Image (spheres, helix red, strand yellow):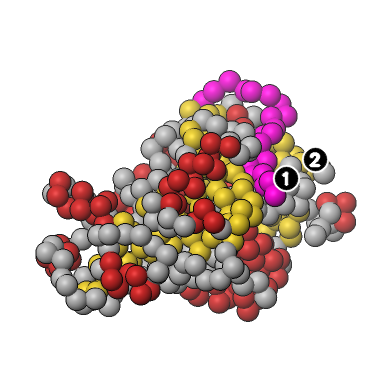
Amino acid sequence: MVHLSNLKANHYDVIVVGAGVIGAAIAYELAQQGVKVALLEKNQPASGASGAAGGMLAAHSEHFAHPELYQLALYSQSLYSKLATDLLEKTGIDIELRTEGFLLPLTKLELQLRHKEPLQADQRYDKTFDENLFPLPNKGHTSASTHNDSKVDRKEWWSPSYLAQVEPHIYAPSGMIYNPDEPQLIPALFNQALVQAAIQHHVDFYPETEVYRLLHSQGKNHITGVITNQGEIYAEQVVLTTGLSTQQLLATEQYSLPLVPVKGELIEVSTSSQYLGHTIYGEGIYIIPKSNHRIWIGATSKPERTDTTVDLSAIAQLLSGAEQFLPAIGSATFERCWSGIRPGTPDELPYLGRIQPLAGLWTASGHYRNGMLLAAGTAKWMAEALINNDTAHIPDCFSPERALQKSKSLSSKSRSTAKGVSTWN
Ligand SMILES: Cc1cc2nc3c(=O)[nH]c(=O)nc-3n(C[C@H](O)[C@H](O)[C@H](O)COP(=O)(O)OP(=O)(O)OC[C@H]3O[C@@H](n4cnc5c(N)ncnc54)[C@H](O)[C@@H]3O)c2cc1C
């Protein structure tokens, strides 16, 4: 930890505001390339949405409306294996990247195939797969694709009898689709490891340091630093990775950038022995096995809710969703529940790039329900953009310009009150 009062120099190449996974990943990436970075966080790492996530890196299973986002998701997902190894080596923190893969209910796939929807950029089912899926073969399980290319889905249909051998607690009379290419991790550990690794690469980390406002050059349109609760700090470039709070910080500059809060709740249960080996990814429900016989069940989706309480009805909803696939899960032990606020955008694309009217100001915000998955790729793109002062490699659809508008100032000390995550034991 570094306190501003202890600083010899308070001028940096880049200030990154917000140490969730997005800010921490960018700081780490920049520092590895020799950039002098300050990482500022008003609370602690993982105190925002990043501490509340399920940790799925579901590049194939998520429904991305935009092909560019799907491409970023695939690229980002491909970085995690090496990243997890590097973080372990550098920090000793095991982010518990698990690669057993996902199981998806067949009904969802059947519906999609029957509707014969036109091929999208994120289309996952090639002809071979379609033919293999129907009619269902009567052997144990069958491979959907012979390709061993990470860009080609390697889904398989697992028959009920095969599933019963592998996952005896799952109820799935039509079998399930197995996707080996979807990993998952522990979000808070990932966030902590990124911050620790950034510090090892000489990033100055300032926890409990809240940015109130931006500093300007005399001409007003050039950002030169930030004003915090601990004093002023200067940099050539400032990156807002403040999730939902990016909206409030830009409002102090009389700009509006719409972000949409979507609350989510999860529960954790434990079992006395191994109960589930694969993540179950259903419609509106996911069930994720973690270490020590823990299972996370998530998540609700409540637009415009910014409180971080957990509704009693959420627990009932999640339990009932999980019972579809794990009929006996009700006998597991309740451990805890929590909630967090997903930082959404109206078009469900994150904002990545310059806040154009204010030279030196950037943002990477609005990763909605896939910030864990997108963090690694976002960091690569943003570091390249900041170092070269060039955004040509970032597709235009991610530019904040698409939604940025001039607005009236909210308050000279606009503060976000929501911590973003709360836990009840
Ligand atoms: C219930 C739930 C489940 C999810 N599950 C998944 C999942 O399975 N897979 C997946 O990929 N994604 C998932 N997500 C989404 C993912 O958690 C988010 O997209 C991601 O955490 C966003 O990261 P961030 O760094 O932008 O935001 P945050 O984690 O919110 O970080 C922003 C940080 O900025 C700090 N900050 C704010 N204002 C200031 C200020 N003025 N000064 C200094 N610091 C400030 C905050 O304290 C916070 O730490 C889930 C989210 C939720 C809520």
**In the rendered image, is residue 31 in sight?**
no
Whether the magenta-drawn stretch holds residue 408 is answered as yes
Q: Would the CB of label 1 be found within 8 Å of ligand 1?
A: yes
Task: Give x and y (percent) for residue 174.
Answer: 25, 60
**What mark, if any, has residue 42 been given in the picture?**
1
Q: Which residue range is magenta in the image?
A: 406-425
Residue at (31% x, 47% y) in the render:
66
Q: Do the residues labelled 2 and 1 touch (CB within 8 Å)?
A: yes
Q: In which quarter of the image is the N terminus?
A: bottom right
Task: Give x and y (percent) for residue 72.
Answer: 39, 57
Q: Is residue 424 left or right of residue 143?
A: right
Q: For residue 27, what is the image quadrant?
A: bottom right
Q: Looking at the image, is 39 positioned above or below residue 399? A: below
The residue closer to the viewer here, 66 or 320, is: 320
| Secondary structure mainly formed by the magenta segment | loop
**What mark, if any, has residue 229 been given in the picture?**
2
Q: What residue type is labelled 2?
A: Asn
Q: Distance between the residues labelled 2 and 1?
A: 9 Å
